[in-house]
């Protein structure tokens, strides 16, 4: 099963993965946008470059036209006037041109337009000597117009781009070179095209001999043109740009000069703004066009995408979060449900032992003054289960649980310990309150139940243990409460407080069980016989066999102590058979020795009785000693007979058929009804000693004994009174016409040898 942590971990992993995925998409989007901007800028650069070139071509053509005129007329002094007037005329029609000078091959002045003095020549001085000369050389060797270095004309208050072009005769020999100034502010129309887009056009002239680049034109309105035009560009910057281009395209600046490719790159300007540049060289006029665009467009476009992606990411994450929250809460609920199931009993819905063990510590902490444990056990529940079936039994458990629950306060902990056992943990109160509580609990549970239209009552035995300070473990406490419960069970429908004596009793029982295992083998067991005497003639009727045990370690242990232990541990089967065999053997021998006949009564306990083939085994032993079955009586307790009537009845009948008599031992203590009594094949009622003890002091008891005797008579049963200790009791019983008397008055239980003497004396 996934834990909460696992699930959240998965969520975080997904969120992080999602984050990376979105980052990946964003970087792609960013790249795509920048690339688009770059190619747009390159495209624009191409167009601008073409525009500029076509303008230069136009100028070139005009100059070619003039050159042709001059070459046609020659530059002899008589033609000079004509040339000057033609040029003046030409300049009037081409206002972007200012000044015109003709020089011969050796840079000697030939003529100029008459408006402008020779001073026009000063462009030669303004530009560096070497550059000017180089340009002049270029003009001499080229048919194309050559661009010079831009300079500022103070007179015109304009930036002027000097142009040079050679004039050749028919033989293609240079006869002169013309110099023309070009006002470059006209090109401002170019800047207007791109101004809105924050793009600026720069024209750079490349005087490559000196590895120098100078600005010839820059469209940015607020630029410091004087500085820009007059100083060559920073070499470091140029090499930086060159490097970045080479890195991106693998071209040097020279390569670009040759292939005229338009390239773009990014760089920060002096103010630290990110800019995109596109660059293209024009071979014909040897200039570079550089377009500078801001990256703002890229960023604003990117931010739009970014916001969209963030929104999607946030929404997706949120949905995912809700989904996971749901999964976690479902999982938690499932877990809680599971924990609830393991900690609660499925059909009473009460907390179970697992719950108790898990929560006892915290419960103890809540009640530091201590608490009581009530160990509650239903009386005779096994009997109900056997008689009415398990589903019925379950219904009772549920009903009982309901009543317990209603009886409990919230401060108490009610637990189904298992089967028909419940626990109540109750914070300490004074003894009086606790006693009241217990009594009301017992009363409440003893009220009538109605299940499947059957009415009946259930009683409880409750063991109580007080846990003052948590000095004992819960297991120890529970076993103490259990001991007390067993003590209460002896009375039923009552409670018992745990004390040391009970504990000793338990320990003793453990000792008894241990020692009893070797008792037969070690010859520690013997049988005594208590005579049973006819009440009227005081002749001997029979004897009851009673077992005795003396152990090396434990000393003499009475059967009232060890028989129950033997029953619980199963040892009774072996022990019972031993007693049966031994008493048959001894009595058979005694009878034949003395030549008298009397009955032998043997106590049979439940476990023995319920044993498979019990009767068959008895008969085998009877045959072995050739014992007269008809002089044999089985004593079975009343409680056993009424609690398990259905199971007991067929066995009783089988016994009866064999001619063995059946005596109902301890009669009067088990509340058997007349109808059950009638249904059972009983030969003898053995009136319990507790009635005989009080027969003289209590007329009520006397009446009771009288009615028992009458019932016996009516049902054709013999009546036997046990525990008769004195003459008055005997006389009273004779008066009530009880049949047989057993008790110390006649004799204590006797060893076989003493019994022989007793019989001989009679
Ligand atoms: P029980 O069958 O009711 O036996 C009668 C008990 O009363 C015997 O105690 C007997 O010694 C005692 N008793 C007889 N007359 C008097 C009297 O006048 N005054 C007094 N105070 N007591 C008298 P015991 O032998 O200690 O046996 C106790 C119980 O142990 C028996 O009660 C019986 O339930 C069980 N028990 C004894 N021997 C056997 C046995 O061999 N097998 C089985 N299954 N149970 C046995
Ligand atoms: Ca008996
Ligand atoms: Ca008895």
Image (cartoon, rainbow, N blue to C red):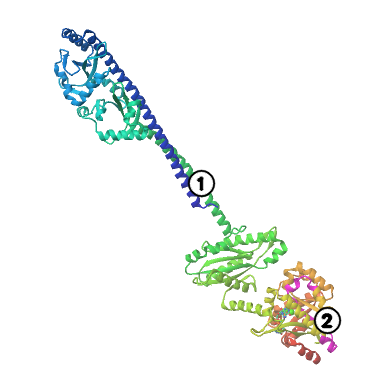
| Res 618 quadrant in image | bottom right
What residue is drawn where x is 76% and y is 67%?
A: 647
Tell whether position 487 is magenta.
no
Q: Is residue 702 visible?
A: no
Q: Is residue 593 above or below residue 574?
A: below
Say which residue label 2 marks: 625
Residue 287 in picture, x, y percent from top left: 28, 24
What residue is drawn where x is 63% and y is 72%?
A: 486
Q: Nearer the viewer, residue 579 or 116?
A: 116
How packed is label 2: few (under 14 Cα within 10 Å), some, or many (20 or more)? some
Of the four image quadrants, the one with ligand 2 is bottom right
Q: Can residue 3 be seen in this view?
A: yes
| Res 40 quadrant in image | top left
Residue span colored magenta:
589-615
Apparent side of residue 98 relative to residue 301 in the rendered image (left or right): left
Q: In the rendered structure, find residue 326 and report the number of the disc placed on it.
A: 1
Numbered disc 2: secondary structure? loop
| Res 575 quadrant in image | bottom right
């Amino acid at each position: 099963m996934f834990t909460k942590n696992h699930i959240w971990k998965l969520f975080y992993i997904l969120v992080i993965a999602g984050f990376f995925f979105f980052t990946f998409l964003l970087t792609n989007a960013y790249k795509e946008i920048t690339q688009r901007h770059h190619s747009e800028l390159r495209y624009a650069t191409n167009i601008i470059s073409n525009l500029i070139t076509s303008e230069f071509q136009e100028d070139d053509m005009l100059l070619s036209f003039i050159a042709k005129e001059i070459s046609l007329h020659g530059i002899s002094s008589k033609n000079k006037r004509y040339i000057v007037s033609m040029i003046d005329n030409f300049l009037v029609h081409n206002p972007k041109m200012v000044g015109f000078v003709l020089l011969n091959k050796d840079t000697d002045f030939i003529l100029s337009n008459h408006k402008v003095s020779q001073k026009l020549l000063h462009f030669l001085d303004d530009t560096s000597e070497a550059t000017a000369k180089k340009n002049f050389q270029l003009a001499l060797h080229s048919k194309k117009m050559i661009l010079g270095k831009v300079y500022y004309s103070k007179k015109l208050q304009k930036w002027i781009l000097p142009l040079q072009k050679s004039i050749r005769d028919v033989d293609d020999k240079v006869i002169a070179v013309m110099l023309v100034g070009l006002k470059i502010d006209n090109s401002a129309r170019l800047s207007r095209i791109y101004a809105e887009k924050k793009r600026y056009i720069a024209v750079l002239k490349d005087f490559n001999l000196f590895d120098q680049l100078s600005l010839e034109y820059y469209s940015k309105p607020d630029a410091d043109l004087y500085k820009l035009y007059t100083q060559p560009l920073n070499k470091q910057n140029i090499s930086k740009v060159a490097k970045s281009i080479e890195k991106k395209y693998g071209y040097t600046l020279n390569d670009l000069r040759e292939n005229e490719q338009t390239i773009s790159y990014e760089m920060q300007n002096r103010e630290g703004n990110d800019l995109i540049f596109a660059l293209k060289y024009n071979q014909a006029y040897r200039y570079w066009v550089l377009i500078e665009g801001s990256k703002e467009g890229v960023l604003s476009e990117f931010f739009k995408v970014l916001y969209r992606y963030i929104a999607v990411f946030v929404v997706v994450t949120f949905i995912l979060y809700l989904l996971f929250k749901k999964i976690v809460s479902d999982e938690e609920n499932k877990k809680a449900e599971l924990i609830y199931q393991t900690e609660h009993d499925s059909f009473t819905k009460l907390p179970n032992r697992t719950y108790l063990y898990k929560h006892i510590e915290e419960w103890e902490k809540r009640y530091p003054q201590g608490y009581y444990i009530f160990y509650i056990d239903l009386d005779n529940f096994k009997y109900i289960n056997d008689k009415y079936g398990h589903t019925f039994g379950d219904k009772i458990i549920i009903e009982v649980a309901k009543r317990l629950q209603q009886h409990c306060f919230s401060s108490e902990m009610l637990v189904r310990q298992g089967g028909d056992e419940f626990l109540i943990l109750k914070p300490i109160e004074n003894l009086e309150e606790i006693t009241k509580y217990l009594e009301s609990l017992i009363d409440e549970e003893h009220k009538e139940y109605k299940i499947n239209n059957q009415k009946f009552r259930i009683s409880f035995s409750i063991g109580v243990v007080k846990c003052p300070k948590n000095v004992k473990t819960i297991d120890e406490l529970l076993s103490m409460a259990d001991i007390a419960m067993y003590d209460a069970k002896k009375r039923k429908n009552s409670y018992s407080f745990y004390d040391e004596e009970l504990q000793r009793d338990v320990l003793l029982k453990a000792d008894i069980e241990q020692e009893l295992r070797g008792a037969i083998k070690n010859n520690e067991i013997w049988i005594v016989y208590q005579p049973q005497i006819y009440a009227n003639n005081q002749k001997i009727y029979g004897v009851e066999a009673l077992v005795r045990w003396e152990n090396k370690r434990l000393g003499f242990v009475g059967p009232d102590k060890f028989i129950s232990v033997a029953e619980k541990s199963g040892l009774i089967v072996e022990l019972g058979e031993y007693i049966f065999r031994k008493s048959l053997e001894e009595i058979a021998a005694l009878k034949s020795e003395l030549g008298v006949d009397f009955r032998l009564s043997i106590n049979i306990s439940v476990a023995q009785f319920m044993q498979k083939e019990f009767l068959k085994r008895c008969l085998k032993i009877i045959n072995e000693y050739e014992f007269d079955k008809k002089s044999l009586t089985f004593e079975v307790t009343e409680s056993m007979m009424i609690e398990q009537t259905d199971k007991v009845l067929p066995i009783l009948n089988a016994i009866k058929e064999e001619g063995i008599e059946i005596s109902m031992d301890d009669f009067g203590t088990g509340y058997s009804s007349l109808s059950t009594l009638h249904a059972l094949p009983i030969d003898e009622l053995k009136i319990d000693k507790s009635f005989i003890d009080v027969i003289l002091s209590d007329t009520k008891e006397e009446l009771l004994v009288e009615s028992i005797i009458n019932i016996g008579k009516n049902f054709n049963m013999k009546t036997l009174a046990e525990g008769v200790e004195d003459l008055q009791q005997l006389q009273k019983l004779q008066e009530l016409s009880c049949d047989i008397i057993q008790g110390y008055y006649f004799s204590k239980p006797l060893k076989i040898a003493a019994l022989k003497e007793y019989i001989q004396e009679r």
